[in-house]
Amino acid sequence: MLSHDQDGFRRAGRPHRIVSGALHYFRVHPDLWEDRLARLRALGVNTVDTYVPWNFHETAPGKADFTGPRDLARFLCLAQDLGLDAIVRPGPYICAEWDFGGLPARLLAVDGLHLRCSDPRFEAEVDGWFDLVVPELLPLLAGRGGPVVAVQIENEYGSYGNDTRYRRHVEQALVARGVDCLLFTADGPEDAMLQGGTVPGRLATATFGARPAERLEALRRYQRTGPLAAMEFWIGWFDHWGEDHHVRAVDDAARSLDELLATGASVNLYMAHGGTNFGFWAGANHSGSRPGEAGYQPTVTSYDYDAPIGEAGELTPKFHAFREVIGTYVPLPDTPLPEPLPRITPALATPAGTAELLGHLDLLGGPPVLRPAPESMERLGQSHGLIHYRTTVTGPRPAMPVRIDGLGDRAYLFADGVPLGVLDRNAPDEGPDLPVGEEGVVLDVLVRAQGRVNYGPLLDDRKGIWRGVRHGHQLLFEWEIRPLPLTDPTGLDFAPDPAEPGRPAFHRFTHDLTTHGPADAFIDMSGWGTGLVWLNGFLLGHYDSPRGPQRTLYAPGPLWRGAGAGTDTGTGTGTTNEIIVLELERPGTELPLRDRPDLGRTTVVTLE
């Protein structure tokens, strides 16, 4: 077991230093877990760190899935087989640039619920989550022969609040369910954050990316004795749509790591391998001070993070620089470095028809629900995807702007099926004019949800329309609403005719592999507008090429069929691969498959 005394960490009674790397199982295809963990071990670390996202596992209140890509126990056992200890951070909140910081979207439908505090209703929800996840962890604790040496209490809580009772509740909820390993907190190295986030009697650690001596000095004021640890040492950064791809210079990051390890502190590299925000799981930030203000910043699909191990498993120059630094402080494994994984032969996918979205509403969402006013996704039991609203505007009336109050996140408007315009939550007052003749107009509003805010005071980030729609100054009522979760678009009726300009449509492509065995690919969306991409029924994630920076989507080898490729995703047993692109604005003319990523124009960041 891992413990600590006034001098430092001890592992099985011997002095020990944690040199850990963050690697999230939920951002890696499960067939590649062992590969990525082996690369992590080759970096020289002795521990793997992972969050456990509540919303990734919960299938319904009181029910959770821990199988397949959610098989936490399998991931941790693979780590142990490779000689790695494990640090587990089960939340309930995780941040992690993950949708809603790992909290279930359904919590946003509970009137008056206060998140991440001692609101009894929220604490009851936390207890329910721990009732599900802790039994998965108990057999894997180090005291029972497993790899898990430490478990985190909440996550950077001092950056959000200062509720002493809530922090103690999370701690005691873990203890009461049998978690008897080392428990710790992690917070920014500032007085307010450490005051708000630490738990008396539990190890306090810090999160930062530079000036380690100064940061550890601040931590020492609150952790008077015992080991010092950077539980998140940021070695890169994440990206938002509409910004550049962030990188941290190799020399700068390696020098800071060396300075940190020279102090004798323990470290967790965040991220050692970033992976991918597959599906709808990418989160968002918000730079505003109040809900409804501009400042929404959705996170891109790639979580490459400029990490030592790239999104597709590449051993980057940062990997080799970090390995050299780590090797001066702890023994490196005496094994060859892993070889690069195969890449696809570049090609163009073959077009195979289109299907307009508005013509398939019943198939995608079933019959509509009727409501007097628009309601959010969460109110209707929906977590992700798109949502469609329809009403009739009577006429005649002059052209007046259509505006949406409470939009999450981007709305496509149609008048009698004709594209009218687009509204974005960051520009809510720029609505298109709608003239209405004597016969009236059917107004369709298709809303695309991107990631929920995962950090800061504006976590209550609802999706869809959560206030109302106005024509001029008049609120519009009597709505038909269809949630469109987009769980499987493979059964659509694809026709050979191209979609009309400005109309959201699914575009089907096929491709037969020529590579023998599983091979990674990167689907080039640079000639398209914005939307979503599925490969053999698996949602790779969002793309937004005009905004950038990301221009290709990572398609891991196990998703491909044919030529000896790996996992069948359940959409068929043939060897032809099916790629479906939901394009919402500007369809491309071709779909290239590349053998290397393009994450866009880069900006070098300097962490303070």
Image: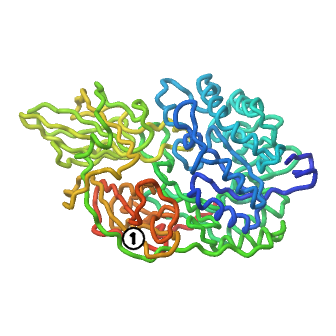
Q: Residue at x 51, y 60 (%)?
A: 567
Identify the residue at horizontal 65%, vertical 57% (top origin). 23
Please provide percent x and percent y for residue 263. 84, 60
Q: What secondary structure is marked by label 1?
A: strand
- In percent of width and height, residue 550 lies at 45, 63
**View extreme (front): residue:** 573
- The vertical placement of 369 against 136, above or below, is above
Quadrant showing the C terminus: bottom right
Q: Is residue 82 above or below residue 444?
A: below
Count the numbered circles shown.
Answer: 1
> Looking at the picture, how far across and down is residue 191, in whole percent?
73, 42
Mark 1 burial class by Cα count in 10 Å: few <14, some 14-19, many 20+: some
Q: Nearer the viewer, residue 28 or 8?
A: 28
Q: Is residue 290 left or right of residue 439?
A: right
- Along the line of sight, which residue is nearer the eye, 257 or 580? 580
Residue 18 position by quadrant: bottom right
Considering only vertical position in the picture, is 161 above or below 309?
Answer: above
- Give residue 254's position: percent from left, percent from top: 71, 69
In the rendered view, would you say 269 is above or below 361? below
Residue at the (47%, 71%) spot, across then down: 563
* Type of amino acid at the residue the image marks with label 1: Asp
Q: How is the image coloured?
A: rainbow
- Residue 438 falls in which quadrant of the image? top left
Q: Is residue 596 left or right of residue 236?
A: left
- The residue singled out by tag 1 in the image is 512
Q: In the figure, residue 355 lies in which quadrant?
A: bottom left
